[in-house]
Amino acid sequence: MTPIRTTALAALAALWPAAAPADEKPADKAPRVLLAAGAPTRDFQFLRTLVAQDEDARAASAVFVQPAPGKNEARPGAADGAPKPLERFPDRLGDKAAKAEDKPYDLASYDVIVAFDLDWTRLKGEEPDLLHKWVEKGGGLVLVAGPVNTVELTRSGDKDAAKRLDPIRDLYPVVLQDARAANDRDTADPWPLHFVGGKEGLTFLKLNPRGRGPHAGWKEFFGADDKAPGGVERGFFDAYAVTAVKPAATVLATFADLRAKLKDGSGMPYLVAADVGKGRVIYLGSGETWRLRQYRTAFFDRFWLEMIRSAAGTAKPAPEPPAAEVALEVKALRGLRAFRQSRAEMEALRKLARETAGPAGGRKKAEVGDEYYQALADLADALASGDEIRIEAAEKEYAAAQARGRPDLDDAVALTEAARKAAPDLLRRMRPAQLTAFAAALGADATDPRERLLAALAEVRGDKGEAKAAADVAAAARALAGVEADKSERVAARMVALLGKARGLSDEEFKTQKADLEKEVDKIVGDVSPVEVLRREAEYALAELLSNPRLGEALDARLK
């Protein structure tokens, strides 16, 4: 799995290249984006920064911030390293795709335009009609409603001026309402979104690529607060009022506050998509996606990068990683947490993992229900965050999911020879506090080899005790031999022979010979000390961590 929480740069590397315009540009090129805004809002600024973090995306993109009220010159709208700032909105439409750096005022230079509460009345001449034609030819348009300028599309005023904006109104997948006529509503509380529809390719609705289902991650973002009017900790505070959804449009999400609703009582449309000719338009009911970034930068990044791809018509849903891979990553993340790895230690571990990790893939597929998969994915995400409160809650949810039915996941980790060699040295270089933390993480699960082998003697005589006895022998061998494969095999071989002997005895014979069998167990265990057992367990745990095929992804998630 998407994995999946990534840094902005990693997200760009993964998402931008796939966003090439159809038949016009190689798939390894960045999408060409124009960020246009009525004012440099937070959403605009964060998205501008995100685009600027990739050299190719920055070179292929531009920004335009309209002049302040009463002014004629466009505001800079750009910072160091940002995309090229424009002095005016593009006012030409070429027949062929141009390059933004060569023809920045040609609409054909862009694949997607993101308009943040733009004052459309400031477009001149035929610009509204040119924009409509650009969308019809295949352009992608994201319309972000806002409290300042969006209302201008609803006002009549001069008839000729109003008619000139008809091509813009036609692009909106909703019928906008005059904000002055909308009911006043208290906007002091956050509200969630209700997802009511979907469409293939709209991958921006999935914030958490780990999760099962098209809307994974939103529940986590919203949180839960029974005392809040909206029932959530986080959310959005407003949605621009509309009177209707156009027939060809698809409502993807509505605003949950029913004080803002349509006449038929349905929720106020917040995310709406529609195809216009060969192009696609996505409507967003408010400029509040920066709240996603407040909670988790990766959620904001994924939402916008995937939305741009969706508007360009190039987004493709990534296949969900198999549950076994998610489980392997959970194991790796638990190991990192158990040893309290610092950032510097994890950086060093990432380099070492390239040499020690086992091969990826080749795992058996398992039938896993959505509920179980989501609980597993949420646990991986919580462990990656390092937030102990989230981890505790996710562990409880996962334990509950396991209690309802645990699938047979192929998530065993075979120790690699490189990991066996590296683990003892890695343990020697650890701080005492880290070994203490590991011991605390083991808690009651710390292995007593003698107890485990004695338990195996009793279990193997039961009708279905072979599996439990085998697990006990394996645990005892780890505690006695650690990463020493030969020694582990000798311990296991001696114990298997003893178990075979015990199993062949009648109940009376077993009762008579039990003391002798226990003496044999004592010989196998020897005089190993508890400290030595703990050291061996720690060595093995480190070797298992280093062998985990998903350790690299787990480290990337922790270091994001």
Image: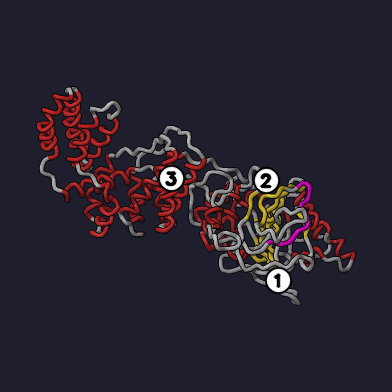
Q: Quadrant of residue 392?
A: bottom left
Q: Which amino acid, mark 3?
A: Ala
Magenta range? 239-248
Q: Nearer the viewer, mark 1 or mark 3?
A: 3
Camera-nearest residue between 155 and 318: 155
* Model colouring: secondary structure
Q: Nearer the viewer, mark 2 or mark 1?
A: 1
Q: Residue at x 21, y 46 (%)?
A: 536
Q: Is residue 304 in sight in this rendering?
A: yes
Residue identified by numbered label 2:
24
Q: Which amino acid, mark 1?
A: Ala
Picture layout, residue 244 above or below residue 370:
below
Q: Nearer the viewer, mark 2 or mark 3?
A: 3
Label 2 crowding class (10 Å Cα cut-off): few <14, some 14-19, many 20+?
Answer: few
Q: Which amino acid, mark 2?
A: Glu
Residue 211 belongs to the span the image colors magenta: no
User: SS at mark 3?
Assistant: helix
Indicate left or right for 236 with 349 as reference: right
Picture layout, residue 412 above or below residue 249:
above
Residue identified by numbered label 3:
400
The x, y position of residue 133, in whole percent, is 79, 52
Q: Residue at x 17, y 35 (%)?
A: 491
Residue identified by numbered label 1:
74
The x, y position of residue 316, in whole percent, is 60, 43
Secondary structure that dominates the magenta span? loop
